[in-house]
Image (spheres, helix red, strand yellow):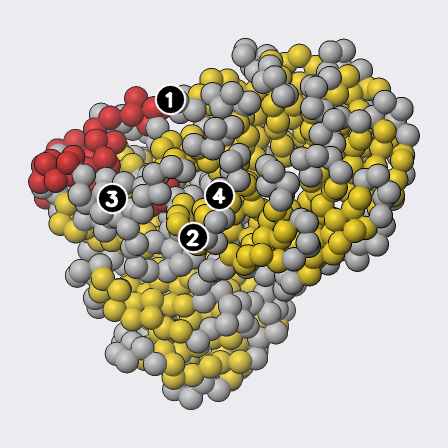
Amino acid sequence: MRSIIEMAPLQVYYSGLFFTPGSSLIRVGYFKNIPWVTMEPKVANLWSSLIQTLEGHTWDVNSAVFSPDGRLVASASLDATVRLWDTSTGKQRAVLEGHTFSVYLAVFSPNGTLVASASGDKTVRLWDASTGKGCGVLEGHTNRVNSAVFSPDGKLVASVSRDKTVRLWDTSTGMQCGVLTGHTDDVNLAIFSPDGKLVASASKDRTVRLWDTSTGEQCGVLEGHTDWVNSAMFSPNGKLVAFASRGNTVSFWDIATGNQCGVLEGHASYVKSVVFSSDGKLVASASYGKTVRLWDTSTGKQCGVLEGYTSYVKSVVFSPDGKLVASVSGDNTVRLWDISTGKQYGVLKGHSASVNSALFSPDGKLLACASMDKTVTLWDTSTRKQSGVLKGHTSYVCSAVFSPDGKLVASASMDNTVRLWDTSTGEQCGVLEGHTSYVNSAVFSPNGKLVASASWDNTVRLWDTSTGKQCGVLEGHTSYVKSVVFSLDGKLVASASDDNTIRLWDASTGTQCGVFKGHTGRVNLAVFSPDGKLVASASDDKTVRLWDTSIGKQYGVLEGHTRDVNSAVFSPDGKLVASASDDSTVRLWDTRNKTTIEIIKTHAIINIIKFSNDGTHLHTSRGIVQLKSSPHSGGNRELHTLTYSLYVTDQWITYNMRKLLWLPVEYRLSCSAVNDTANLIVIGSPSGRVTFISIDFTALPAAYLQPSVRVAVIAGKGFLGLVGCSKLS
């Protein structure tokens, strides 16, 4: 946040007014000073318990952990770094660089002076927590290191790897002091006993092995698991060890005898995580069956079921005083539970992607969550404040689209629903329920009377927008349906699927009238030509294919992309097709001779493309590019000033490619749509939120109204870049 303020303070000031809770003094007192806002986003009424959002990682954050004194957080990321953060200010204290591959885990030593990090580059690295400097590279593993852990006295590190070994290292010298062999498959994790005399390691070979840390000798094999062991933990007194298994069970073992002394059954799907309370009297287990279960360790009986999740539960952790449980769910939320009552008293929402881990601070006052949205968030566990419930989707929003008349928006979500929204008010006006799995996309018919939705349940469903009732289930695909589209006359529907096919359907009857086969990879999108005679399909097989709808046969294969093709669109006259790919290019094709006539290097992956009404420009999710009217003949092209436009790019709403509003994490997009007059933008978020923001361009400050981005296309290759774009502050 500090870097955003330094870069663009005016925009952050506006964002502060926009997104602060409705009852806050700042919003009440000053929001009237933004005259260019004609529809403001709906916000919670009260502040939530979110304290800090720590941003800086450039890729998913795999784990976050507090230092023993609670003053620092260490986060490990797929960007190959570990970052240290000050919990009181949120300021980044150090970036620990040196790994050459993803870092899966970082952990503090018991005295807080060292950090150990485990990486896919086959090493463990030790770092000085006060300076961030490297102080040792532990080399020896021959495959990626999955995890590392300090012994209770901090003198040893145990690391586990896909090379099927556990290795012990002396932290004072960095020397390897033991290679523990015996597992016959990847080793997932290792834990020290409370007295440090034992290490328990869990493997994909379905065994747990106990090792004597002083000799490196194996002193027990705990067998009998029916599947992988996902999680393990010693009881506080060191007499028991508990394991969570993909076999849907939690098992207890007596360390002294090596015998199994209990199997806890009840979960409906495999158990991902298991943890003891600080006094050892309870065990909490988290399951992909959407529950957390509490167990009494003295009796082995279930004493509580924590329910209410909309997705699988990935991990669970007790607060240090044992009064709370925090659970991480696949719906991007963390939930807090009161152990004494078994009741949920907080749902921590804010991450825009899956949360990988959560951990309490040593004093239990903070909870740190690491996420795939590249951030770590810190939450106050004592306030129990609810920021208000914004009605809408309960999971990731996959797509949003305006109706032809602009009066409605349809949003498709992983909560298995499509929702209709009134664009004049931003209020939800319909919930289309019936799909039995995630809904990937939704689209209106040309007359706006129908919505077609594509789902992971392998179906397309048709809905009446006036009543919200289902009026057709189009079945036939054998895998996920990725997208769906109406022909311009509304008579046909085309659906694209992971089964590598495109299917045509009669929109009035719902009957299948064609199957297009030929792609060798999943099909991401299909689109009709303006006259309905052709369908273009974009696929992971790196091609765009053209299909003749009248005879149901392939008309052409457009080859040239070097990675998956995400999107394709016809020009208004149907003579051209534009396609966007993961190879960071947009290609322009002649549909008659099936050749490439232009390649535009975007230097970023483009997911959304469409032609301007006159066919002279391409509007993309990264900006607008003016197209050539004929094949390249060499030489430089003239620079063309871009027209005004409204976009969402990364953390920003931009106007004319200038930063207009900074988006807090919970409002960032999974999808977006802009209406035809480009004054209303709709943002769908991974949290399930759908946000409407309307802008009066005539009231914008003058600095926003001057175009500053140009496009240069040179010698047959397109380059989309920023020319003379000044910072607005």
Question: Closer to the camera: disc 1 or disc 2?
Answer: 2
The amino acid beneath tag 1 is Thr
Residue 172 visible in rendering: yes
The amino acid beneath tag 4 is Leu
Q: Residues within 10 Å of mark 4 (few under 14, many from 20)?
A: many
Marks 3 and 2 sit apart, C-alpha to C-alpha, by 19 Å
Between 458 and 582, the one lying in front of the other is 458
Residue 54 is labelled as: none
Reading the image, the residue beneath label 4 is 324
Marks 4 and 1 sit apart, C-alpha to C-alpha, by 25 Å
Looking at the picture, how far across and down is residue 659, in whole percent? 27, 35
Reading the image, the residue beneath label 1 is 89
Please tell me which of labels 3 and 2 falls first in the chain.
Answer: 3
Q: Are marks 3 and 1 in contact (CB under 8 Å)?
A: no
Residue 344 is labelled as: 2
Please tell me which of labels 3 and 1 falls first in the chain.
Answer: 3
Q: What is the secondary structure assignment of the residue under circle 2? A: strand
Marks 3 and 1 sit apart, C-alpha to C-alpha, by 22 Å
